[in-house]
Image (tube, grey):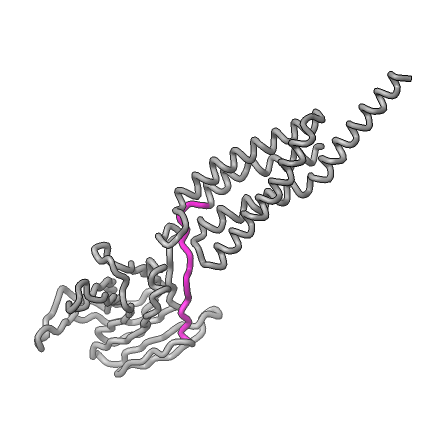
């Protein structure tokens, strides 16, 4: 019965483990490898090089003429609906600075001070009303000139005042003067508390905490009853039911993972399901044997007293 007690302690871990692991998790929805993208621009040199086994896009402006490079365009609505950030890692080498220039009504306007360039994320939304105009929202990072190893840029998707999803996203690089920019593969990131989930990470933590505590205490009760040789019918029925429940939870977790539910959804199902199946399946035979041994002892004792 020592193994029964030891394995039942695993049930007590469900509450703390599920509560901790169900906190909001950042997940990578897709990595855009430069080898699969068609990056084009004029007045610059574009090539894919390898750094530490990772394909890196090198964009070099050999002139002092500002250039713009369309790096990535996403129009998959299902993918956009699950995404929260676009993440870029950029390095730069001998980038010169220039004034940021914008064109408005065929007039060039110099804005702000001197920059090396800009990473610009454009989100195009459909019209709010029929016959209206589409809405464009931009998020950007201005970067300075010079040389820098690697810097990470995370740009948020969707403006909170817009109810609709963007029709498409486009990531552009503006390089205002000469120099070279290096970009690692771009990542599309989502958070586990994405509204598309069956429940939120906070709810998953609550479910794991309460459910895990109940199951843990229930496992302790089963162990105590078995050690005392009491309530055989209840214990065997409860053990079998726990195995069935574990199988159902495991299947539910696998289905949630297949449907690409957030981490807090499939983990909250899969982890307790696997633990239930393992704990009670491994102990079912020993539980039955324990009751049989106690029954044989009882019968032997009655026969001895009768003799």
Q: Quadrant of the N terminus?
A: top right
Query: Where residue 85 appears, x then y in whole percent?
Result: 33, 59
Could you tell me which residue is drawn at 84 percent across and 21 percent down? 301
Q: Residue at x 29, y 72 (%)?
A: 94
Q: Residue 120 lies in what quarter of the image?
A: bottom left
Q: Nearer the viewer, residue 291 or 209?
A: 291
Of 191 and 277, nearer the camera is 277
Q: Is residue 128 left or right of residue 276?
A: left
Q: Is residue 151 visible?
A: no
Residue 62 vertical placement versus 87 (above, below): below
Residue 152 vs 209, above or below: the answer is: below
Q: How many marks?
A: 0
Which residue corresponds to the image point at 37% horizontal and 59% vertical from the top-left? 189
Measured as percent of width and height from the top left, residue 203 is found at 40, 42
Residue extent of the magenta highlight:
22-35
User: In terms of image quadrants, where is residue 173?
Assistant: bottom left
Left or right placement of residue 95 versus residue 7 in this view: left
Q: Residue 136 or 145: which is nearer the viewer? A: 136
Give the side of residue 126 with respect to residue 87, left or right: left
- Where, quadrant-wise, is the C terminus in this rendering? top right
Q: Is residue 270 visible?
A: yes
Name, please, the residue furthest toward the bottom.
Answer: 43
- On screen, residue 140 above or below 254: below
Task: Give x and y (percent) for residue 249.
Answer: 54, 47
Q: Residue at x 56, y 48 (%)?
A: 248
Q: Position of residue 225 (x, y in %)?
A: 66, 27
Task: State yes or no: residue 155 in magenta.
Answer: no
The answer to if 27 sits in the magenta stretch is yes
Which of 185 and 277 lies nearest the eye of the viewer? 277
């Amino acid at each position: 019965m020592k193994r029964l007690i030891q394995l039942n302690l695993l049930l007590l871990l469900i509450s703390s483990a599920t509560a901790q692991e169900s906190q909001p998790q950042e997940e990578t929805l897709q990595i855009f490898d430069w080898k699969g993208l068609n990056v084009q621009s004029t007045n610059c040199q574009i090539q894919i090089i390898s750094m530490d086994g990772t394909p890196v896009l090198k964009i070099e402006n050999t002139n002092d003429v500002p250039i713009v490079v369309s790096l990535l365009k996403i129009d998959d609505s299902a993918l956009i609906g699950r995404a929260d950030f676009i993440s870029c890692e950029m390095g730069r080498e001998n980038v010169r600075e220039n004034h940021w220039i914008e064109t408005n009504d065929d007039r060039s306007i110099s804005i702000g001070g001197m920059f090396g360039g800009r990473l610009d994320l454009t989100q195009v939304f459909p019209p709010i009303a029929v016959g209206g105009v589409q809405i464009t929202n931009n998020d950007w990072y201005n970067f300075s000139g010079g040389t820098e190893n690697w810097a990470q840029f995370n740009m948020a998707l969707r403006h909170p005042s817009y109810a609709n999803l963007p029709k498409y996203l486009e990531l552009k690089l503006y390089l205002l003067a000469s120099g070279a920019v290096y970009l690692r593969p771009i990542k599309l990131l989502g958070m586990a508390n994405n509204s598309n989930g069956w429940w939120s990470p906070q709810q998953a933590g609550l479910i794991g905490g309460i459910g895990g505590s109940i199951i843990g205490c229930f496992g302790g009760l089963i162990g105590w009853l078995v050690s005392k040789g009491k309530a055989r019918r209840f214990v065997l029925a409860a053990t079998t039911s726990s195995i069935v429940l574990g199988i159902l939870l495991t299947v539910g977790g696998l289905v949630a993972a297949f449907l690409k539910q957030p981490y807090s959804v499939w983990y909250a199902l899969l982890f307790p399901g696997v633990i239930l199946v393992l704990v009670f399946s491994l102990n079912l035979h020993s539980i039955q044997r324990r009751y049989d041994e106690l029954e044989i002892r009882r019968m032997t004792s009655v026969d001895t007293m009768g003799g």
